[in-house]
Amino acid sequence: MPTWQKVLWSTLAILGVVLGVGWIFRVEIALWGVQRMMANQVPVSPTQTVIWSTGVDSRAAADRPPNIVLILADDLGWNDLSMNGGATATIATPNIDALAADGVNFSQGYAANGTCAPSRAALMSGRYGTRFGFEFTPTPSTMMPMMSLISTTIDRPLQPPSIPNTESASLEFSEMGMPPSEITIAELLKEQDYQTIHIGKWHLGTTNGMAPNDQGFDESLFMASGLYGRLDDETVVQARQQFDPIDRFLWAAMRFAASFNGGPAFEPPEYLTDYYTNEAVAAIEANKDRPFFLYLAHWAPHTPLQASKEDYDALDHIELHRQRVYAAMIRALDRGVGEVMQALEDNGLDENTLVLFTSDNGGAGYIGLPDVNAPYRGWKITLFEGGIRAPFLARWPARFPAGTTIEAPVHHVDMFATAAAAGGAPLPDDRKMDGVDLAAFVPPASSALDGEDGDATTTDPGTPHEYLFFRSGAAQAVRDARWKLMVSAPPGGARQEWLFDLASANPERDDFLDQEPAIADRLRAVLDAHNAEQMAPRWPSTAAMPINVDRDLSQPDQPDDEFAYWSN
């Protein structure tokens, strides 16, 4: 064999080995690339002290409007709260439960969407996010391709099969958000001389006038990344899910960082949930002498799963490691709610403060806990009840009677309208507003509502909404007081519909589409009319992906499993 052929074949052999090794370790190489990319970002500075501004309102305390505190959990499952069953976390959540016991539980409360950012847009604007093109959750440009690569190594591919959107996104991650033309609840309340404070997650854009400080917040302690603690911190316990591509990406991409009022990123001094709680307490103390609106947007219990060792050690009755870490995260969240309520009481603000509590969507199937949304079907990233049914609590002792349950369906947009009305702020009249003031549906606290034994009262004061709507590309839904039409319509794929009777003993399991064609036609027409009013998405989805409705990501798919498509 000529020398040149020997060299050629040797070179090809070496190249083959290199490519083979590269293919075998492609995921590790890709994750290493993400880590290197993150390492090249602006470094995170040491901890800094946040100084909240103070001020005094000239009015007597009795003449001031109520303070307003909106507490938002992230990916909290319906069954994570002991008031709803508590089987997932297997712990009590006494402080969150107390909000319902001392106030109003809207038992059919809905998140605006099955994923986080569109729900936050609705909360902040009082409108369906699709009215201003906020249809899909913003993600970094590297996330979806990376997840597709990672998912090829697990039993359930991320997109089997996926139908990609061939449009190229023209916006950077920081540019995907709520446009400044929207009027936020912070802007409305600021006009009523409220001090407006944001703590935690934002996910509504950070450039071109979309950052919290540009959207009506006087002060913002911003979640600059997504770790709850340093990876080398022995006081923080981790649970990594190899079966979850989202989880593997987050561990590679996230840092432990916060920023204040648009300043440089710095490292929080303690476990993130506790840090947000303690800063919320400090902000309450700083503003005890003037009306304030506090938007406390916790990251918990969203992945990556990290808990304080103290909370983890307290739950040694939980055998499954990831469930124990998850439960410990909820323990910190619930404790934080209690500390915020204690701060209001300690500062004499408890009676005249409206406290609202909800989650941005239901619990995620990719954490590998099958009962997270029981008894509801589905997960985050679906429009089944498990994805959009959320705790919806309101406490205002000066106005709301304790222990009241409202059974009518309500929506995140109503929290905007309720907070605005409490603060004396008229709703914008130059655009379609979707929320209603829920106080109009709650009997006043002075009414004699309790039974002879002091039992909580369930009231039926009317229906705030004739219909509620949900949309994320391929996934769409509409419900009335009883019926829910679900649509799964991926681009280029077959359209599937379900008609569910939410008042039945088996909600979202018995399909009435064939038995009730008139109801389906009515809801289909209402959904079409609603869609005709909505704006085209401001940025395209990257893919439509099928989600297993009944099995969490740790469980292998079965031939008869049911899937619903979701666009993002």
Image (spheres, helix red, strand yellow):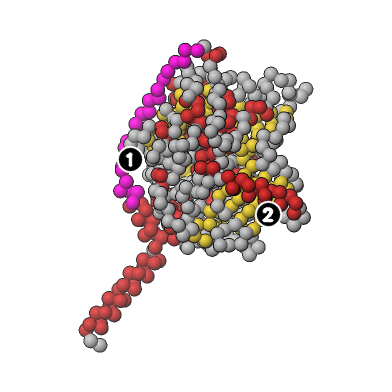
Point 47% across, 29% down: residue: 187
Report the front residue among 533 and 324.
Answer: 533
What residue range appears in magenta? 37-59
Disc 1 designates what residue? 44
Q: Quick one: label 1, few (<14), some, or many (20+) residues within 10 Å? A: some
Q: Can you say whether 562 is above or below 330 in the image?
A: below
Secondary structure beneath dot 1 equals: loop
* Prevalent SS, magenta region: loop
Quadrant in the picture for the N terminus: bottom left
For this orientation, the residue located farthest to the bottom is: 1
Circle number at residue 262: none
Q: Position of residue 64 (x, y in %)?
A: 53, 16
Q: Can you say whether 477 is above or below 496 in the image?
A: above
Name the N-terminal-most of marks 2 and 1.
1
Q: Left or right: where does residue 137 sit relative to residue 263?
A: right
Residue 296 forms part of the magenta stretch: no
Point 51% across, 35% down: residue: 124
Report the front residue among 459 and 241.
Answer: 459
Tell me the kind of residue under disc 1: Val
Circle number at residue 498: 2
For this orientation, the residue located farthest to the front is: 430
For this orientation, the residue located farthest to the left is: 3
Give the spatial CA distance, label 2 vs label 1: 48 Å
Report the front residue among 556 and 438.
Answer: 438
